[in-house]
Image: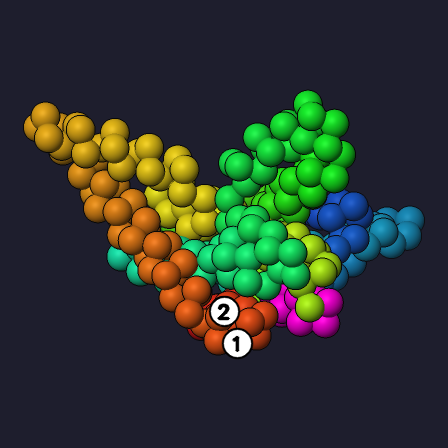
Amino acid sequence: MMFIRPLLLGAAIALLAADVQAANPPVSSSSRSGPSCVVVNNVRKLTPPVFARSAAFARRGGDAPEEEVALPVPEVSHDVPENTELSAEEESKSNSPKSIALSTKHAIVAGCILACNAGYINGACLSGILSADNTKQAAAAVTGAWTNSALGMASGNTQQFTFNAKCIGSYCSGSLLASLLNPNPVPFDIDVNAVSPAFLIASLLVYASSSVAKKSEGTNKAYIYLAATACGIQNSVTSVLTSNMVRSAHFSGITSDIGTFLGQVLRGNNTNALKLKVFSLLGLSFWMGGYVSFSVTKAVASSGLLFSSALFLLVALALMIA
C-alpha cells in the first residue's frame, strides 16, 4: 500500500499536465514578436501575449528543457479606429473653397442691377462727352467694333482698324481674365474665391478708366479700353454662373432671343416664357442705365464712372463677408 499511493498520485499529476498541454498548445517563437490582433464589432483589439512557465519535468539523466505554455489571462484591449482618414476628410472640407448657392430670383435681381451698370458705363463712353474729339465708342458691346475694324482695314485706315481692334481685344481680355479666375464654374453656385476677385479687378479697371479720362481730358482713348475690359469681366461672370440666362452686358443676342421667344408665346408655346420675361427685364435695365448716364456724365464728366467702380467694389466685398 505504501507504493500504490505514490503511483496513483504521480499518475494523476501526469494526466493533469497532459490536459493543460492539450488545452493550451505551445506558442511558437515567431508569435512572441508582437501583440496579437483580433477584430470585435469591427474594432481591432490588441492583446499583448503573456506566458507562464510550466513546471519542469524531471527525467532520468537530467532535467528536460522548459516549455512555455500560454495561460488564459485577462484581455487588455486598445481600440483602433478602422477609418483613420476621417480627420483628413474633415480637414479637406474645412479648406474647401467657399461657395454661395444662387437662386433664380436672386440671379435675376443681381443681373438687372449689373445690366443697368453696364448700360451706364456704355452710355458714358458712347455719348462722346468724355472724349476730346467726340469719339463715340461702345464699351459693353463690340459688334460694331468688329465691322469698323474690317472697314478700316479695307479702306486703308490703319488708325480706325487699330482702335477698334483694341476695343475687341479689351473686351475679350476681360472675359479671359474672368475665366482664368474661375476655370470650372458651377451654374448657380458662386465660388467666392474666384468671383469676388473678378469684381474687385473690374472696380479697379473702371476707377482707372475714370482717372485716365480726367487726366488726359479725353485725349487718351485708354479709358475706353479699360471700361470695355471691366464689362467683359462682368458679362463673363454673369453668363457662366447662370447658364447664359443672365447676360448683363452684350444685348445683341438677347434682343434676338426676345423676338424669338415672343413669337413662340404668341403661338401658344410657353416653353421659354420665363426667359422672355428675364431678357425683357435685363434689356429694360440696360436701357435705363444708358438713360441715366447721359445726365450724370454731362454733369460730372469722367467722375460719373466712379459710381460703377463703387458698385463693383460693393459686390466684391459683399461676397467676401457673406
**The magenta stretch spans residue 207:** yes
- Compared across the picture, whether 172 is left or right of 59 comes to left
Question: Which residue is drawn at the image coordinates 19% and 34% (left, top)?
Answer: 262
- Compared across the picture, whether 237 is left or right of 180 comes to left
Q: Position of residue 21 (x, y in %)?
A: 63, 48
- The image quadrant of residue 41 is bottom left
Question: Which residue is drawn at the image coordinates 29% and 45% (left, top)?
Answer: 279
Farthest left residue? 268
Going by the numbered disc 1, the residue's amino acid type is: Val
- The image quadrant of residue 103 is bottom left
**The magenta stretch spans residue 269:** no
Q: Examine the rendered structure and indicate whether residue 93 appears above or below residue 237.
A: below
Q: Which residues are magenta?
A: 204-216
Q: Are marks 1 and 2 in contact (CB under 8 Å)?
A: yes
Q: Which mark is residue 297?
A: 2
Q: Position of residue 210 (x, y in %)?
A: 62, 68
Question: Which residue is drawn at the image coordinates 53% and 49% (left, top)?
Answer: 138
Farthest right residue? 61
Q: Tell me which secondary structure the magenta stretch mostly adopts.
A: helix
- Compared across the picture, whether 208 is left or right of 75 comes to right
Q: Which mark is residue 300?
A: 1
Query: How far separated are the C-alphas under marks 1 and 2?
Result: 5 Å
Q: Position of residue 166 (x, y in %)?
A: 69, 43
Instruction: Categorize mark 1 by other alpha carbons within 10 Å: few (<14), some (14-19), many (20+).
Output: few
Q: Nearer the viewer, residue 288 or 152?
A: 152
Farthest front residue? 133
Q: Examine the rendered structure and indicate whether residue 84 appears above or below residue 313.
A: above
Q: Position of residue 159 (x, y in %)?
A: 74, 39
